[in-house]
Image: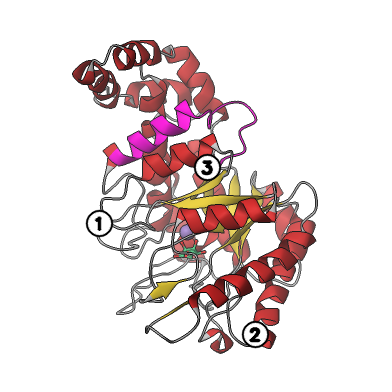
């Protein structure tokens, strides 16, 4: 078992990227409820993300979404982030909100549309070159709604050809992360529906391409920890997009729907070396807070992930191995359950004290007055949202 001290050492270097879009307004196709104090531009989003880092000490980087975070001076935005104690992270592309993408983007049957999508991905790499971000996250809404609508294998050929062009643009230290999702917005077929499709494209592309596992992008009952174990074993787990789901891609707070699943995933990450020094796995939130306040929701997400990681770190690995090799089914299960049922909140409180932080980040943020300040200051202008 990792000692408490060893667990804290790992947790001290463990960090999570928060998504710029979590700070803006979001909703369902039925309604977007605006909230007071919501950022009006990427600069204000970064300021909110900096608060999450200030109180958790574990969220030093902010994922960008282009064009939602479009600005005419990315160097200025990066400087602004630095001044607030954070940095600009993963650049997420968006090839799903333009009328031209009605039948797809990089898989479209029309070469001109495919090139338009590829050009957008080139633009994202340009932004990475300015901000110093190393990861390009690709999620494609491409797919079809009706059998016969398009040639399924042909779409894979177009996808690969487009990805190859983008891959060739990456510099040596940059990565491409290919995210999969089994359905939505396409309902019959999706062009990157599962980890296997993503994995095969990544291996054919080369070492700079890895799979992104968004925890909300699986059919109910999918054993996500198996996928994680497999990808780690093959060194192709590039990143997580964390969130939780009850039904479809709900984008709720990670660990809210199924904290036990999150623990099981973290256990496999730990077993596969994903928390080791110099890990190449990045841990990112991909969530929307439609009815709950956004900054506290991000803080809670960070603490939920930390709790799951702490529980995974205190699994008695020696006892587990011994039970496994002895065919002691219940004993092995007990070892995992013991760790899962341990209350790690005091350990995390100690960790924060050692880092000079308040033991309860949620409370500390609530007392800081920041929420009241932004509600009073951010009056007028258009609040940021998915379309902004
Ligand atoms: C798609 O559902 C997704 O998970 C992708 O990561 C997008 O970039 C993100 O959500 C947008 O919210
Ligand atoms: Mn995602």
Q: Is residue 47 visible?
A: no
In the rendered image, residue 272 lying in the magenta stretch gets the answer yes
Which residue is situated farthest in the left direction here? 330
Residue marked by disc 3: 16
Q: Is residue 110 left or right of residue 272?
A: right
Q: Does 195 sit above or below residue 189?
A: above
Residue marked by disc 2: 113
Viewer-nearest of labels 2 and 1?
2
Q: Name the image quarter holding the N terminus.
A: top left
Instruction: Give percent across and percent down for residue 362.
Output: 38, 41
Which mark is drawn over residue 246?
1
Viewer-nearest of labels 1 and 3?
1
In the rendered image, residue 180 lying in the magenta stretch gets the answer no
Question: How many residues crowd around disc 3 within 10 Å: few (fewer than 14), some, or many (20 or more)?
Answer: many
User: Residue at position x 36%, y 71% from top?
Assistant: 27
Q: Is residue 280 left or right of residue 258?
A: right
Q: Does 63 sit above or below residue 333?
A: below
Distance (Cα) linking label 2 and label 1: 35 Å
Are discs 2 and 3 less than 8 Å apart at CB?
no
Question: How many residues crowd around disc 2 within 10 Å: few (fewer than 14), some, or many (20 or more)?
Answer: some
The range drawn in magenta is: 261-282
Say what secondary structure mark 3 lies in.
Answer: loop
Q: Earlier in the sequence, mark 2 or mark 3?
A: 3
Distance (Cα) linking label 1 and label 3: 23 Å
Is the residue marked 2 within 8 Å of ligand 1, measured from its CB? no
Q: Is residue 176 visible?
A: yes
């Amino acid at each position: 078992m990792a000692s408490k001290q060893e667990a804290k050492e790992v947790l001290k270097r463990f960090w999570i990227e928060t998504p710029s879009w979590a700070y803006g307004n979001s909703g369902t196709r039925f309604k977007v409820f605006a909230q007071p104090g919501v950022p009006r531009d990427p600069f204000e989003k970064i300021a909110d993300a900096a608060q999450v880092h200030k109180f958790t000490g574990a969220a030093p980087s902010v994922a960008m979404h282009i064009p939602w975070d479009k600005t005419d001076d990315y160097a200025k935005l990066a400087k602004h982030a630095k001044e607030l104690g954070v940095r600009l992270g993963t650049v997420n592309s968006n090839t799903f909100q333009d009328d031209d993408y009605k039948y797809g983007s990089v898989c479209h049957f029309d070469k001109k549309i495919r090139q338009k999508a590829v050009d957008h991905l080139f633009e994202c790499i340009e932004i990475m070159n300015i901000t110093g971000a190393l990861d390009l996250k690709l999620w494609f809404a491409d797919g079809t709604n009706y059998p016969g609508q398009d040639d399924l294998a042909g779409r894979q050929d177009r996808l690969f050809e487009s990805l190859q062009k983008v891959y060739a643009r990456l510099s040596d230290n940059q990565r491409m992360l290919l995210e999969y999702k089994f359905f939505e917005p396409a309902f019959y077929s999706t062009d990157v529906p599962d980890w296997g499709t993503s994995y095969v494209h990544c291996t054919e592309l080369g070492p700079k391409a890895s799979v992104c596992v968004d925890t909300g992008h699986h059919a109910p009952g999918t054993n996500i920890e198996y996928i994680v174990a497999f990808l780690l074993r093959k060194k192709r787990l590039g990143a997580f997009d964390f969130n939780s789901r009850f039904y479809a891609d709900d984008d709720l707070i990670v660990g809210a729907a199924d904290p036990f699943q999150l623990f099981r995933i973290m256990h496999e990450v730990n077993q596969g070396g994903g928390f080791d020094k110099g890990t190449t796995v990045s841990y990112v939130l991909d969530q929307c807070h439609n009815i709950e306040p956004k900054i506290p929701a991000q803080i809670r997400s960070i603490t939920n992930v930390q709790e799951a990681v702490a529980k995974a770190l205190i699994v008695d690995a020696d006892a587990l191995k011994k039970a496994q090799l002895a065919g002691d089914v219940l004993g092995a299960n007990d070892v995992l359950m013991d760790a899962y049922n341990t209350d790690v909140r005091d350990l995390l409180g100690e960790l924060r004290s050692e880092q000079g932080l308040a033991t309860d980040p949620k409370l500390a943020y609530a007392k800081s007055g920041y929420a009241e300040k932004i509600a009073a200051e951010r009056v007028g202008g258009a609040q940021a949202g998915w379309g902004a």
